[in-house]
Image (cartoon, rainbow, N blue to C red):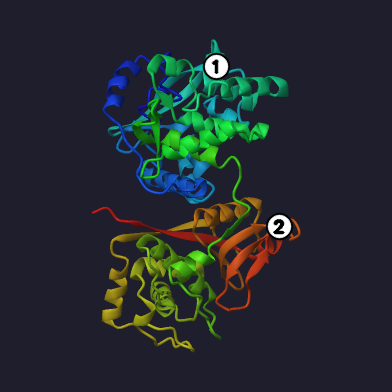
Amino acid sequence: MGVGSASLRYRCRHNPRTGILVVVLTLLVARAESGPELSPTQAVARGRAFLARMIDPELGLLPEFSGHSDYWLYHDNYLAAKVLDRSYPDEAERVRQAIAKQGIARSGKIELLFSEAQLPLRRYELRDVAKVGNKTIRSEFTTAELFAAPERYADLLFFIAVAEPDAAKARAAYDSAMAMWDNVGFHDAVVIESGRYATYKLGLALRVAERFHDQSEALAKVRERLLKLQNPDGGWITDYQPDGTPIGMANVETTCLAILGLEAGGLPVRCNLRPEFARLGLKQRSQGKRDTCSVFSTVESTEFALARSNGKGVALSVEYANWAANETTGRGDDGDFFHNIILGIQKHGVCPEEAMPYAKTFSPDTQPNSEIVAQAAAFTQGRRLHFHWLKGWSKKAGLDDRDLLRVKTVLASGSPVSAGSYHSVLFVGYEEDTTQPGGGRFLISDSNLKETEISYQAAKERFSDLFWVNAEVESP
């Protein structure tokens, strides 16, 4: 949740704490970073990274906002698990398990967005669930009491619009909510009482508009306003003034609803990262006659992540990564599984290609000298590599539609995806095409220098594991 009084929990009419929070909010004004605006997919990628960084290693939950001691199961962590699943599925599962550990299975309101609850709207109450040191785990619970006068609040009308089974009533609720749009935000009872707008209602509007296939000019302005309210760290600010000035802090709930709204229209129909590889100076290399396709794919993902972080690409040593995998596992063969190669990089680092060039033939006696090992350990200094599994390895090959959606989400966000099989490759783009088996194709970077694309259907039948990499600047 957030400190914003216009948030889903802290409305003026519901919580006496709001009066105090008004004073706090006037002191917490944050302006978005200047510079070129991000595309919706870029903004969403930054938002997901913000959420992933927020996970408390002790609790497996996200706090209300950075540095806060309250951890809300519903709505914050429930929403975070939904949002993270598209490109951080391991993290999403961790959050789901942490929620389940507390024995809380529902709220009764926010689930309306996912057809996991039913109308009517009911009032809620906030309860403490557990205490862990100075951290409080809390949640929202609906009561038997019905909401009065939901027509005064844009968010409640949007909830009715998305969950009402009667199409005419749903449309009427949606139209009533959109009628509150004043080219700044949704001017409902909360704005009248508090004088400021709630950011999450923008995301909620975009999410619900999907049901009605609304492509109006008003909705385009809602999206534009929402994009301007993203903080430099990737999260979305809770509230804003009539002149557009953000107020408050970036919090979990608002960020989740912003992401859900921006993705409601679907992913781009095509994505191609090849020009970005070229811009960064990263060229496709050949594995020759060696069995190192998985090493190449892993190294290429890693060097792209580091290149995006540094602004310039440096070819990394496949030979060193191959040695590091063997050194870590105690094996002495050529090539390995993704997970062993990743372990090798995490333990021994990685050095530039020029320090340990790729050999035409494999020798188990190949060893880097101490200078190269030291260089590899220091190469990523100031950058932290994160490897994210979209699908863990299984002996039986096969992907499903959810796996493909995750791959496309990561590609659209600007990162390639390593795909493992009898011959591993790197996905560097996709294109929706109904003439292709499965409805489209993935663009491929192939160290065998043979494949350039593969249909969705062929990818579903062939690949067994998937991961992607990002690199973040370490805090001083």
From the top left corner, tell me how far across and down residue 86 is, in percent: 54, 48
Mark 2 vs mark 1: give the one in front: 2
- Considering the image in quadrants, where does the C terminus appear? bottom left
Q: Earlier in the sequence, mark 2 or mark 1?
A: 1
* Residue that sits furthest to the right in the current view: 435
Residue denoted by label 1: 122
Question: In the rendered image, is residue 156 in sight?
Answer: yes
Question: In the rendered image, is residue 118 in sight?
Answer: no
Q: Which of these two is toward me, 84 or 363?
A: 84
Q: Which amino acid is tagged 2?
A: Asp
Residue denoted by label 2: 433
- In this rendering, is residue 100 above or below 404? above
- In this rendering, is residue 329 above or below 25? below
Q: Which of these two is toward me, 423 or 156?
A: 156
Label 2 Cα neighbours within 10 Å, binned few <14 / some 14-19 / many ≥20: some
Q: Which of these two is toward me, 348 or 100?
A: 348
Q: Which amino acid is tagged 1?
A: Arg
- Considering the image in quadrants, where does the N terminus appear? top left
Question: Which image quadrant is residue 65 in?
Answer: top left
From the top left corner, tell me how far across and down residue 403 is, in percent: 60, 54
Point 55% across, 11% down: residue? 149
* Residue that sits furthest to the left in the current view: 476
From the top left corner, tell me how far across and down residue 450 is, in percent: 62, 78
Point 61% across, 45% down: residue? 266
Distance (Cα) linking label 2 and label 1: 44 Å
